[in-house]
Image (tube, rainbow, N blue to C red):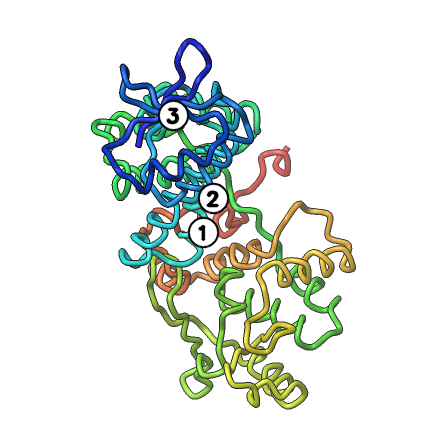
Amino acid sequence: MSLKLNNNDLICVKFNYNQEIINKIRLIPGSRWNPAQKYWTFNNDKAKLALFIEMFKDEYLIFESEIKNFAAADAITDYLNYYYLPQFEKKLKLKGYSQSTIKVYINHNKNFISYLKKDLFSITMNDLNDYILYLIDEKENTHSFANQFISAFKTFNNLILGLENVNRKLFRPKKKKKLPKVLNKREVKDIINSVYNLKHQLILIITYSAGLRVSEVVKLKISDIDSERMLIYIRNSKGDKDRYTLLSQSALTKLKLYLKAFQVQKYDKQWLFPGQNKDRHLSKRSAQKVFKKACHKAGINKKVGIHSLRHSFATHLLEQGVDLRYIQNLLGHKSSTTTEIYTHVSNKSLTRIINPFDKL
């Protein structure tokens, strides 16, 4: 079915003959059949259009006029999200995308559709470029965030819309090269020692000592700890990759105390760090709050997040003389270029340089 507005501010609905559709349209107050133009009409009224969309929300609807000119633009936007995004989510799952990536891609496209207020098959390069500038200039998002949207939309276009030449012409804003925020060893120690709750302290210890992402540490299971080989098995990490990383001897000592005190092994799901609902793991947000509270107690004023523990792990290994290739494997980086950024924050070589001021 297609909908457009005429000069009399009437909504004109065209479709192939279908008695069931006709019966439904007749339920809309003031609906009329135009025999000359061969379409049904009703007033561009918010309540009437909302009723129409509710009746036909599972049908394929095309909006030939600007959505912003329809009385119920928000209802149309809701329809577009309702109709297309579940299809997109299903195809992402079939393609094997991770749940976190699916969530991010769905949210990006949902926000874009809400901003656009336009039929999705009439999207132009100007629409996309305007939205990217809106994200950067008005919403003050980073270039990385804008690039994430571009990836989300390109995938949506590939799997659902099929708009020709759009993906090829869509260029990415240049990323700003920011160095990772790193804590020194004393600061890491102070943060960990400021936490008295054994579970919370162990979360920070393992995050640092194994160089984990917060999403990885909260999803650890007891069976992922290999105390004989002194390794931790990371399942379904970023890019759906598995890997092994280090298990610290000091962390293992704390872990044994934790398992004895908290008895998490008795729960069915065997999460190492279960949430309040023992069938689910601790949330990333909860782990981030633990870190933030610990920084405050330790008097750390740097603007750092829990991910800084992973950055610090990599930097401290590099300063200890560990080869970059091993650090890359421990972190699960696909490219060595990603790992090489730690050479810019390491003081390994800088400490050997004699400051000219000291030679005056």
Q: Residue at x 48, y 58 (%)?
A: 314
Residue 170 visible, this orientation: yes
Above or below residue 292? Residue 82 is above
Q: Residue at x 68, y 88 (%)?
A: 261
- Residue under circle 3? 128
**Kind of element beneath mark 2:** helix
Q: Position of residue 274 (x, y in %)?
A: 59, 75
Q: Position of residue 91 (x, y in %)?
A: 29, 52
State how far apart marks 2 and 3 are (Cα).
16 Å
- Residue under circle 2? 107
Report the quarter where the N terminus lies. Answer: top left
159 or 67, nearer to the observer: 67
Residue located farthest toward the top when viewing the structure as drawn: 7
> Label 2 is placed on what type of residue?
Asn
Discs 2, 1 touching: Cβ within 8 Å: yes
State how far apart marks 2 and 1 are (Cα).
6 Å
